[in-house]
Image: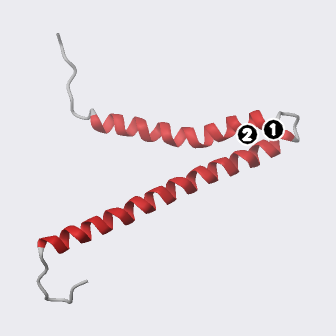
Amino acid sequence: MSRPGERRSPADHDEERRRILRQLTLWTWLYGGLAVVLAIGTGALVAWLFHHAGLPFRTTWLVATAVIAGVPVLIHLVQAFREKHKGREPDDR
């Protein structure tokens, strides 16, 4: 890092940008991995609770995990699709 008031070269700025992007990529993967682990764990907890009601554990675990992880993913995909196609007029041909 440079001292306050010291001029920095464009190469220094590029290196800092690369460092920041590496850190952001790392944090993104960590949060994504944590979300997957939490979805699997929550699905297991739900399956365990429903297992006492007579439902099969493994099937319930898979369905619960798919719902817990899948709903937010679907919401994100719909929002991204809408944002991408925002303001476009349909063709009247």
Residue 24, image x, y percentages:
38, 62
Give the SS element for disc 1.
Answer: helix
Residue 89, image x, y percentages:
20, 25
The quadrant where residue 16 appears: bottom left
Residue at (21% x, 29% y) in the render: 88
Which residue lies under the disc numbered 1?
57
Residue 87, image x, y percentages:
21, 33
- Front residue of this view, candidates 91 and 40: 40
Is residue 55 depicted above or below 43 in this figure? above
Which label sits on residue 61? 2
Which residue occupies the extreme top position in the image? 93
Q: Across the whole image, how many numbered discs are drawn on residues?
A: 2
Give the SS element for disc 2.
Answer: helix
Contact between marks 2 and 1 (CB within 8 A): the answer is yes
Q: Amino acid at mark 1?
A: Phe
Direction from residue 72 to residue 59 in the image, left or right: right
Which label sits on residue 21? none
Q: Residues within 10 Å of mark 2 (few under 14, many from 20)?
A: many
Direction from residue 4 to residue 36 in the image, left or right: right
Residue at (44% x, 62% y) in the render: 27
Q: Residues within 10 Å of mark 1 (few under 14, many from 20)?
A: some
Using the numbered discs, state the Cα–Cα distance from disc 2 to disc 1 in whole angstroms. Answer: 6 Å
Is residue 11 depicted above or below 74 in this figure? below
Q: Amino acid at mark 2?
A: Trp
Residue 5, image x, y percentages:
14, 89
- Front residue of this view, candidates 3 and 72: 3
